Amino acid sequence: MEVTLNIKNLSIGYVSKKQTTVVYKDITAGFTSGMLVGIIGKNGLGKSTLLRTIAGLQEKLQGEILFDDKNLEQLSKQELAKMIAVVLTEKVGGFNLTVNDLVSMGRVPYTNAFNHLQEEDKKIIDECISICGLNDHVLKPVNELSDGLFQKAMIAKGLAQQTSILLLDEPTAYLDFPSKHQLFELLKKVTEEEKKCIVTSSHDIELVLKYASHLLIMSENNEFEFIEVSKYKGSKLFAKVTNDYFN
């Protein structure tokens, strides 16, 4: 089923007792199933804040976030968890937590009050572990995984939620170059074969250009552009953002 995610005139930032800090404003973009979107821009511009706001983990300042024309504020936490999965960069706790345990956590929105897994849940968990190439690591504690395998396990957990949208914050940040390629190949495979909409922030611009379908470009002075990757050479903002990267 095709899903749409629209953000309209979105302003993001932080609210404290003393003041409101606007990080970015007037962001407008539309995402659909089958898109792999790379968010690029310098540190501190609000890439992570944007992802957290879309996911409902942080309140927006103004504007709209619409999932299939339903406003984010109209959705319960359980409804939202069935529509959108988030993979953040933080490590999860739990010394004895295995890969299977971690991926199983993706089924929480669908289980009963005792988090009892049904046979269908177990089947979905096994499928997600297989998709991410983790069959040989099912019983391995997550704290013993390499950074690359850990990110794959987190993606498997996100897939187990069976959401239409998957958000990732710098998933390749701590990976070596071959692992970065493998991870982006996995994201592209999931996008195409599972018909997901994946939105990921990344500083690996060359990989974003190779694997993503769309770019969401953020720059200083609140400059913003959402384009197809095939059109990046005609984007002045892309040239501005990546000037230091390629030179």
Image (tube, grey):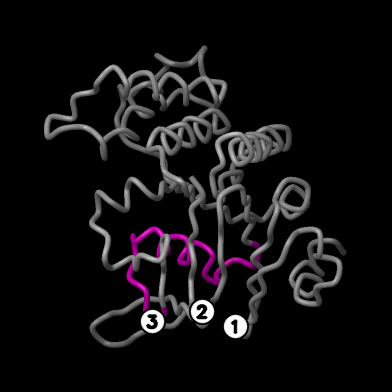
Q: Quadrant of residue 68?
A: bottom left
Magenta stretch bounds: 40-63
In which quadrant will I find the C terminus? bottom right
Q: Is residue 12 magenta?
A: no
The quarter of the picture where residue 63 lies is bottom left
Q: Which mark is residue 38?
A: none
Of 125 and 155, which appears nearest the observer? 125
Do the residues under discs 2 and 1 have CB atoms within 8 angstroms?
A: yes
Helix, strand or loop at label 2? It is: strand
Residue 100 at what x, y percent from top left? 37, 21
Provide the residue designation for mark 1: 222
Residue 215: image location, x then y, percent? 68, 62
Rendered position, 79 above or below 53: above
Q: Is residue 175 left or right of residue 210?
A: left
Q: Residue at point 12% right, 29% down? A: 114
- Residue count near mark 1 (Cα–Cα under 10 Å), binned few <14, some 14–19, many ≥20: few
Q: Residue at x 18, y 24 (%)?
A: 116
Which mark is nearer the camera, 1 or 3?
Answer: 3
Q: Could you tell which of marks 1 and 3 lies nearer the N-terminus?
A: 3
Q: For residue 55: magenta? A: yes
What number is the disc on residue 24? 2
Circle 2: is it few (<14), some (14-19), or many (20+) Cα within 10 Å?
Answer: many
Place of residue 237 in the rendered image (x, y in percent of width and height, measured from the top left)? 75, 76
- Residue receiving disc 3: 62
Of callouts 2 and 1, the N-terminal one: 2
Could you give the CA–CA distance between mark 2 and mark 1, rounded to whole angstroms? 6 Å
Type of the residue with mark 1: Asn
Q: Secondary structure at mark 3?
A: strand
